[in-house]
Amino acid sequence: MFGISIAQVILYFRSFPNDRRPMKLRIGMMFFWDCAHTASLLGIFWHLLLSCRRSTSPDCLETSASWETILGFIASLVIAHSAQSFYVYRVWIISGRNYIVTGVVCLVAVVQIMFGLLSAKTAVKSRDLQVMYSSPYPALSAGASSLCDILITISIAYFLRSRSELRRQENHIRQLKVIFVEIGLMSCIISTLVAVTLSLPDVEARQNWALAPGPLLTKTYFNSMLAVLNARKVIRQRQVEGRGQMYELRTLGSSIYRTGRFEDS
């Protein structure tokens, strides 16, 4: 999925050069952490699958947290927080600035970050992965992440369904809803798998099984955010083909003008 991320980042910067600088900086920052996450995964799997395969050396049997593990964990937290804050703002716009809905989603996201930081603190302080996985913090963080993804997906699907401002706009709203729901369901399923694996009774089983869906969830967050941003290109082209009518796509905080110019707010 790292290759897909690279392709989507290139597509984003080539297609939307007029996007505001904060959004460009966010994408650049997330891509940097995605590269760091990929590098940490390469180090971890090299250690587990190649250098320590069928080995009983002390270096392979120890459970201390390596720099690759700590770097990957930090990168996962940063990417998850950035992606979910992106979606929280979209919920805020789509819901018509609904304080209750947005507040609930924000609260769950903050809880996830809090437990994630506690997990990182446990790993850094103990320098032992088994100590971290034996604590309840990773499972609670994953559970809050899954709940946050579910709330975001349901909120966006509900408020997009209730929008019927312009008849000709309904097709574009339907396209947006399909994009958000499909991407949201994917992240919900993967985050739920992470929560389930981190809730297993055996500590070693948690550590082993979480290696599969955990990294995949981080890649899904970044790619889903890029997919939503890049979907504007297709919608813009279809609106320009539809005689350049002006439709306000508050889902993405944007407008398409009669001249075909696209601006991201």
Image: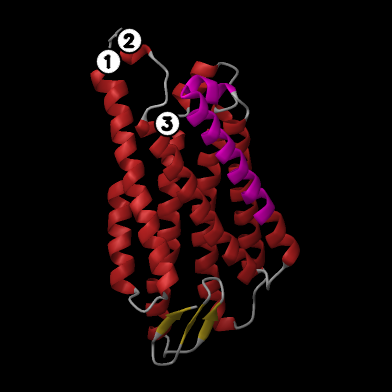
Check disc 3 and report the residue beneath it: 212
| 94 over 56 or under it: above or below | below
Circle 1: residue type: Arg
Q: Quadrant of residue 60?
A: top left
Q: How many marks?
A: 3
Say the numbered circle drawn on residue 58: 2
| x and y, in percent, of residue 138 in the image | 57, 32
Q: Which SS class for mark 3?
A: loop
Q: Earlier in the sequence, mark 3 or mark 2?
A: 2
Q: Earlier in the sequence, mark 3 or mark 1?
A: 1
| Within-10-Å neighbours for mark 1: few <14, some 14–19, many 20+ | few
Q: Which SS class for mark 1?
A: loop
Q: Is residue 113 inside the magenta stretch?
A: yes
Check disc 1 and report the residue beneath it: 53
Magenta stretch, main secondary structure class: helix
Which residue reaches farthest left? 51
Q: Quadrant of residue 30?
A: bottom left
| x and y, in percent, of residue 39 in the image | 29, 40
259 left or right of 133 in image: left
Between label 3 and label 2, give the one nearer the viewer. 2
| 80 over 116 or under it: above or below | below
| x and y, in percent, of residue 238 in the image | 40, 78
Circle 3: residue type: Ala
Gap in angstroms between the C-alphas marked 3 and 1: 18 Å
The part of the chain drawn in magenta is 106-134
Say the numbered circle drawn on residue 258: none
Determine the residue positioned at 39% across, 14% down.
Answer: 62
| 21 over 85 or under it: above or below | below
Gap in angstroms between the C-alphas marked 3 and 2: 25 Å
Asked whether 235 or 15 is in front, the reply is 15
CB under 8 Å between callouts 3 and 2?
Answer: no
